[in-house]
Amino acid sequence: MSPNNLGFGLGLRPVHYPEIFDGEPRIDWFEAISENYMVPGGRPLHALMRLRERWPVVLHGVSLSIGSTDPLDWDYLERLKALAEKVEPAWISDHLCWTGVGGLNIHDLLPLPYTEETLEHVVGRIEQVQERLGRRILIENVSSYVTFTQSTVPEWEFLAEVSRRADCHLLLDVNNIYVSAFNHEFEPLAYLDGIPAERVRQIHLAGHEHNDTHIIDTHDHPVVDPVWSLYAEAIRRLGPIATMIERDDRIPPLAELVDELDRARAVAAEALNSRRAA
Ligand SMILES: [Fe+2]
């Protein structure tokens, strides 16, 4: 595998440790939630380091709050950097969102107004983070349930411009595109068409909860057929990209997720064939 395409991975969930360590699961790499491993010397970090002996690992954060107007949390970045020095992840990612203001973290990934002012704010902060970590980071599109009347450009244009101006990479969550496209009535293929392929390093797939009038991004179901189709379109446009499945609730046995990952391999292989043919 090239360093830019790790293949097909899973979000690391401790409930799967016995199946991971005792078997030879068809999993190419794992994504670990950074914040769960930031206590030095703890058992979670010990398990992660054991896993790291056999698999590539990427770190995925939920606390960077890159869009917030609070100052950047330098203590958090220090701990993230120390973790990265230990784990040597293939890359580090977080979300295009804010998670609180006034020192409060509400642990929700909230969307931003897509304006020039926000763009300058976010780009400046990503540059500072990359400088501190000594590496480029990946920024992920979140799912959302509200939009801002102040927004002047669609989300995909904003995300693309962030990646160019901050010289960062992208983590494209295909399920989030599908969820937000339904909730805000935009065309998901327009989103894909607006993403600069050379910036994308990783793809997330996940399941959600459909409530007729709106979709909630619950990560507690298998990936649905329309998201598989959108994933195929993404691979057709972007080429081979490291792909993984996120499951955060109603977590099934590892074998079920490995089967779902096999479907991702098959969908990607077919999409790459049709990309070559085109
Ligand atoms: Fe995601």
Image (tube, helix red, strand yellow):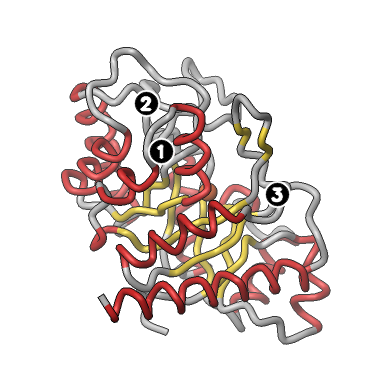
Disc 2 secondary structure class = loop
What quarter of the picture does the C terminus occupy? Answer: bottom left
CB atoms of marks 1 and 2 within 8 Å = yes
Residue drawn at point x = 51 percent, y = 53 percent: 60
Residue drawn at point x = 38 percent, y = 66 percent: 235
Q: Quadrant of residue 151?
A: top left
Q: Amino acid at mark 1?
A: Trp
Q: Name the residue that disc number 2 marks.
A: 71
The image position of residue 2, as x and y in percent, is 37, 82
The residue closer to the viewer here, 4 or 133, is 4
The residue closer to the viewer here, 4 or 244, is 244
Neighbourhood count class around disc 1 (C-alpha, 10 Å): few under 14, some 14–19, many 20 upward: few
Instruction: Decide if residue 211 is on the left or right side of residue 72.
Output: right
Numbered badge on residue 58: none
Residue drawn at point x = 60 percent, y = 60 percent: 245
Instruction: Decide if residue 75 is on the left or right side of residue 157.
Output: right
Q: Name the residue that disc number 3 marks.
A: 248
Q: Amino acid at mark 3?
A: Asp
Mark with earlier residue (3, 1): 1
